[in-house]
Image: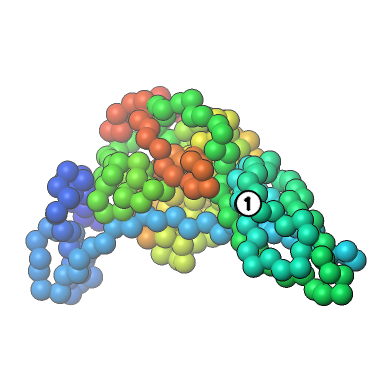
Amino acid sequence: MLGRLILLCGLLAFAGQVAALTIYKYTDANGVVTYTDQAAPGAQVFVFRDRMIERLDNQVKLETKTHEAGETLLVRNDLYAPVQIELRLDKVDNAVGAPAKPINWVLPPRSAIRLATLTRRDPSKPLSYTPKLRYALGDPRLVPTQTKYPLPWRGGPFRLTQGANGQYSHFTPKGRYAMDIAMPEGTSIVAARGGVVVKTENRQSGRGNNPSGNYVRILHDDGTMGVYLHLMKGSVSVTEGQRVAAGSFIARSGNTGNSTGPHLHFVVQRNVGLALESIPFDFSRPVNSLPNFAVGGE
């Protein structure tokens, strides 16, 4: 198993340098899985994906309060992070008070705001409209203050298997500058920076239904967010709304979701204006070195 993992890590490292390289996954009659750059009968092209799916529909909501004169529109943010919103009303009919332009606002964590109150122009007729709400985690007005991050794990040394702009999965705006580090399952993962835990997933087994697997998202004071993906089921030790310090234990590495093998996917993101995107960062030490806080445990 260790040999196959090392082989896969080596192929991935090479693949990051040569975009045209195709990796094949081959399972022999004994169930032994081999990753190789050589096509073989029965081998399948191995597709690398680290796309992140977060369901916020139940935590950022447009609410309508009906009253005698018409309707009031409110947006509620139940997250432990600010949310930028944009509300637009289309196909407005028989309504007074409808905004002519989209309403843009940044809602603080755990808050709600009234955005518009509509009344009927003709009281004998109903009012109608089509609301369209867009939103994104984070406050786009904040400016990142840190570009170098301590290694977010204990132990090692480990190996970087896919870096920024990797051709297999690090090519979308959300993951363009992510780092994949191969490590044994169960490795202690620690917070690279202090902040507030915004979102967690801790119950996914194997591939599950989310490509990210189990994960932790931490909001830093400068508005950036550190996200730790593919964590071991049941290992996440932090809860949403909790403030954590840099270097504190948050989970154990795993191989959940659409993972290429046991590894940590770490990315730093920020709201760039109704869009959450990854931003460039560097580790303050080489990945294949032992972290400063490697000694000790949770």
Q: Is residue 123 visible?
A: yes
Badge 1 amino acid:
Lys
Give me the residue at 9% from left, 61% from top.
Answer: 38
For the residue labelled by badge 1, is the local secondary structure a helix, a strand or a loop? Answer: loop
Residue on which disc 1 sits: 101
Comparing 225 with 64, the one in front is 64
The quadrant of the image that shows the N terminus is: bottom left
Furthest-front residue in this view: 122
The way the protein has been coloured in the rendering is rainbow
Q: Is residue 124 above or below residue 119?
A: below
Compared across the picture, whether 52 is left or right of 181 comes to right
Residue 77 x, y percent position in the rendering: 68, 50
Query: In the image, is 122 to the left or to the right of 175?
Result: right
- Give the residue at x 68% y 66%: 92
Q: How crowded is mark 1: few (under 14 residues within 10 Å), some or many (20 or more)?
A: few
Q: Residue at x 51, y 36 (%)?
A: 224
